[in-house]
Image (cartoon, rainbow, N blue to C red):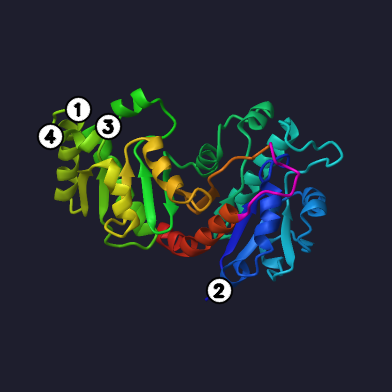
Amino acid sequence: MERPIIGIPMGDAAGIGPEIVLKALAEKELYNTCKPLVIGDVGCFELTEKFVNSGMKFNIVEEPEDGKYAHGTIDIVPAGNIDTKCLLFGKVQAACGKAAFDCIVKSAELAMAGKITAVATTPINKEAIKAANIDFIGHTEMYAGLTATLDPLTMFQVRNMRVFFLSRHVSLRKACDLVTKERLVTYIKKCRKALKMLGIERALIAVAGLNPHSGEHGLFGDEEVREIEPAVQEAQKLGINVTGPVPADSVFFQALNGKYDAVLSLYHDQGHIATKTVDFERTISITIGMPFLRTSVDHGTAFDIAGKGIASPISMIEAIKLAAYYGPQYRSRFCC
């Protein structure tokens, strides 16, 4: 089977992005499953190599098809120019925010043109993005805007546990207000479609409870009785293999052990805590709903250790692996 080309944007040059990319691509096993293509400034990677000492060589290419894709050589499509003489590790810089965004734009262009299969992103810094006067707050919003995608879906995966989110960056009070029958039915349908696009045809989805013990039939909190149970029942009538509400203190453990193919978490921290407690570094974020798949490390730019050569590449390795695993089947299903 032809190895998929996975685009890897550089991220914020003042953070650990270039470092974890170099360290990840030093792992020979990645080249057995994909063709990793870095999108960024070669000078930044040459500077990073001085303290990483990966032993990798750099091959600048204009088109993805020109890459060597052999261990020992990192193929780079130029994007996001950085003046390395002015680069300050661990500092918010508008130039780094602009360069990071330029790399993201280039990755989207290549993916939309069918020249790369999927994208695995490195961390960006929201303050640097703002300083560069870019009107997007984060990766998901950028890719959604660049691909004209309305409300893309976020899924976390760690080991064999998959978690979707009914809401993301809102207050806990607001998140509770968003637990409505209508929204739940919509998201259950979106989750089923997303899992099919990942190649999981007959997935069993569990909806997490909101209140302790799922409210004990309304004894402390009636959201389960009033909103969640009716939503699950309506989705079941539509032929969706879904169950719930399942108490949140057990549903994630059960999913990790194979009882459910995915869990719909009802708010941000409910699902984040569950996945990251299992394995923080191997929890990978996947964006679904765009014309191509995007995976991402689930950590930030780590300005406190940037430029020191001590950043762990584990999350980057896992993000690239998942992009290579899901990317081809996702793309074929999306196009259909």
Residue 172: x and y in percent read 37, 26
- Name the residue at 26% across, 49% down: 206
Q: Is residue 277 left or right of residue 112?
A: left
Q: Is residue 221 left or right of residue 141?
A: left
Is residue 115 something one can see in this rendering?
A: no
In primary-sequence order, the first of circles 4 and 3 is 3
Residue 2 is tagged as: 2
Numbered disc in front, either 4 or 3: 4
Q: Which residue is mark 1?
A: 221
- Name the residue at 21% across, 38% down: 213
Tag 4, which secondary structure? loop
Residue 179 is tagged as: 3
Q: Determine the main secondary structure of the stretch shown in magenta.
A: loop
Residue 51: x and y in percent read 80, 51
- Name the residue at 43% across, 50% down: 278
Query: CA gap, disc 2 to disc 1?
Result: 53 Å
Tag 3, which secondary structure? loop
Query: CA gap, disc 4 to disc 2?
Result: 53 Å
As shown in the figure, which amino acid type bears the numbered disc 3? Val
Q: Which residue is mark 4?
A: 217
Q: Residue furthest right?
A: 85
